[in-house]
Image (cartoon, rainbow, N blue to C red):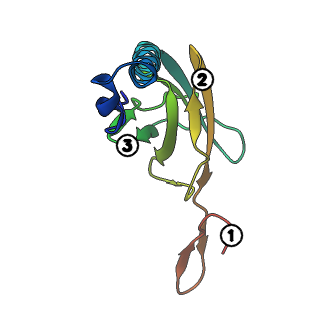
Amino acid sequence: MAIDLPPFSKIYKQREGADKFFYDKIAEVVEVVNALTAAKKGKVNISVKDDNEDGVAGATVTLTSGSDVFTSGETGSAGGSSINNVPYGVYSVAVTAPEGYNTLASYDDVTVNSDTTSLNLTVNKKVVYTGSTETLEEEPGGL
């Protein structure tokens, strides 16, 4: 996620005095920002539970920021998984729930800005109502 110098600033590179000073300072800031953002990566610990706080096995979590996509392995029996080497930044979150669960439509974005970030997510169990002539599945938020 490197940033570039603004196009207009390259004009100042060829000038003298204050204009050259302005360009040099912008170039230094861009270099430092790029170095810091490239070096910072963290681990995201994931917990996927159902509405009863039971761990959900077999879910996968995807973090997306621009063209960067990071996907966890399937969660274990306690609902846990992790993603390593995630660059610092803000990511949208998507969950692929296993059969028998409804994935909630949206989750808050997660900010990765430390060595370890925890992400606690909830999926709802599908509830099946059986009547004499039809079967209904409950969607998140009830029937």
Residue at the extreme front: 17
**Image mark count:** 3
Numbered mark located on residue 66 in the image: 3
- Residue 44, compared with residue 35, is above or below; it is below
Q: Secondary structure at mark 2?
A: strand
Q: Amino acid at mark 3?
A: Gly
State the SS at label 3.
loop
| Residue 67: quadrant of the picture | top left
Q: Earlier in the sequence, mark 2 or mark 3?
A: 3
**Marking on residue 55:** none
Q: Residue at x 53, y 87 (%)?
A: 133
Please give left or right for residue 110 compared with residue 14 in the image.
Answer: right
Rate crowding at label 3 as few (under 14), some (14 to 19) or many (20 or more) other CA atoms within 10 Å.
Answer: few
Q: Looking at the image, tell me whether mark 1 or mark 2 is earlier in sequence order.
A: 2
Q: Is residue 85 visible?
A: no
Residue sitting at x 42%, y 22%: 30
List the residue tagged with mark 2. 117
Q: Amino acid at mark 1?
A: Gly
Horizontal side, residue 56 vs residue 41: left or right:
right
User: Which residue bears the numbered disc 1?
Assistant: 142
Q: Is residue 129 above or below residue 117?
A: below
Q: Secondary structure at mark 1?
A: loop
CA separation in Å, label 1 and label 3: 34 Å
Mark with earlier residue (1, 3): 3
Residue at the extreme right of the image, as rendered: 52
Tag 2: residue type?
Answer: Thr
What residue is shown at x 30% (from left), y 30% (from top)?
A: 10
Residue 83 place in picture, x, y as percent: 44, 24
Choose top left, top right, bottom left or bottom right for residue 1. top left
